[in-house]
Image (cartoon, rainbow, N blue to C red):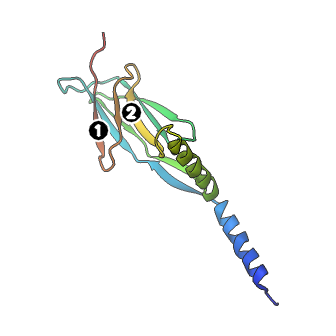
Amino acid sequence: MNFTKAKIILIIILIINVIGLIPFPTKSVPEWKVTAVDKQGNPLSGIELVEEWRFSNTLPMSRETRTTDENGEVTFPARTFISPLFFRMVLFIFDWLNYLAGHGSAMGGYAVIDSKNTIHIIHYNNGKKKDTLIIEKIR
């Protein structure tokens, strides 16, 4: 079989396209343990905390609400984003265009907020396995 240069290039392009369409998972948010406490450092049980996350600023925000236990603790599971490489490249381009236009950051993100008093927000600090959210009573 006589392969010409054009046939070899066509096969390479076809292989790249097939690989670019295969979805693969990425852990976009690690497991996050949060303790809710009052100003004196006492744990607050029964407080609803909301984790918000997204892989890209182009995609909508995802949310999950969990209630703290008797120690004021709640654990949010790791979040996984599954998509093909081509879709990720498109998201990357749109995120940077939004960033360059002055509409926010170029990356996705995640935070935990107190569902009743949304002024209490903590953002994930890479490498930290546990965070504390200090909640003040609002009159």
Question: Neighbour class for label 2 at 10 Å: few (<14), some, many (≥20)?
Answer: many
**Dot 2 amino acid type:** Val
- Please indicate, yes or no, whether residue 81 appears anywhere in the rendered image: yes
> Where in the figure is residue 130, as x and y percent of width and height?
29, 42
14 versus 42 height, above or below: below
Q: Which residue is mark 2?
A: 112
> Where in the figure is residue 11, as x and y percent of width and height?
74, 76
Q: Quadrant of the C terminus?
A: top left
Q: Most extreme residue toward the front, as rendered?
A: 101
Residue at 46% over, 42% down: 105
Residue at 54% over, 55% down: 25
Badges 2 and 1: C-beta atoms under 8 Å apart? yes
**Dot 1 amino acid type:** Asp
Q: Which residue is mark 1?
A: 131
Element class at badge 2: strand
> Where in the figure is residue 62, as x and y percent of width and height?
52, 36
Label placed on residue 9:
none
Q: How many marks?
A: 2
